[in-house]
Image (cartoon, rainbow, N blue to C red):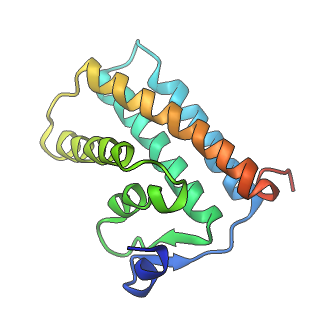
């Protein structure tokens, strides 16, 4: 599967990224990552914050590549996660872990299952690594999107 194939089957839309939106997504991911480390709130909220940071990184990478997910149908979170090898070049074993976090988030959100501290730690660690990867990838491939407008 390629990004062009995902575009053809309407899972993606073309998008012209701006530096401001990419920088806003990075800043939001940084805030959410920081929030995921606040131990005075519940594990569920910390997990949600880390997951949100992961999604913001994945969206920033996709937008920088000239696409955005089609949000009119379910599955755009899955598309963002599973596209990470195509956008940021993350290894398959990484996207498998990120996709398992996505599934855990769905179960927790829709069934009320508890999230334990080990899942919070995994999500936070993965979010931090993805943010680092995103910054390096942007600096190398799309430095113009990191510059203030």
Q: Residue at x 47, y 49 (%)?
A: 90
- The x, y position of residue 26, in whole percent, is 64, 44
Q: Quadrant of the N terminus?
A: bottom left
Is 141 placed left or right of 9 in the picture? Answer: right
Question: For residue 105, what is the image quadrant?
Answer: top left
Q: Residue at x 54, y 54 (%)?
A: 88
Q: Residue at x 42, y 87 (%)?
A: 8
Q: Residue at x 58, y 32 (%)?
A: 31
- Front-most of 2 and 134? 2
Furthest toward the bottom, the residue is 8
Furthest toward the right, the residue is 149
- Front-most of 116 and 125? 125
Is 47 placed left or right of 65 in the picture? Answer: left
- The x, y position of residue 111, in whole percent, is 12, 42
- The x, y position of residue 72, in whole percent, is 37, 75
Q: How many marks?
A: 0
- The x, y position of residue 108, in whole percent, is 20, 39
- Front-most of 40 and 65? 65
């Amino acid at each position: 599967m390629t990004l062009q194939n995902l575009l053809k089957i309407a899972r993606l839309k073309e998008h012209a990224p701006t530096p401001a939106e990419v920088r806003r997504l990075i800043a939001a991911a940084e805030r959410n990552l920081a929030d995921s480390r606040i131990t005075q709130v519940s594990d569920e909220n910390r997990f949600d914050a880390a997951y949100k940071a992961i999604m913001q990184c994945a969206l920033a990478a996709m937008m920088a590549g000239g696409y955005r997910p089609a949000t009119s149908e379910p599955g755009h979170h899955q598309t963002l996660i599973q596209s990470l090898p195509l956008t940021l070049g993350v290894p398959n074993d990484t996207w498998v872990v990120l996709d398992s976090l996505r599934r855990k988030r769905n179960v927790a959100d829709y069934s009320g299952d508890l999230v334990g501290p080990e899942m919070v730690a995994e999500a936070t660690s993965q979010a931090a690594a993805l943010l680092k990867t995103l910054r390096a990838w942007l600096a190398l491939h799309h430095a113009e999107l990191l510059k203030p407008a």
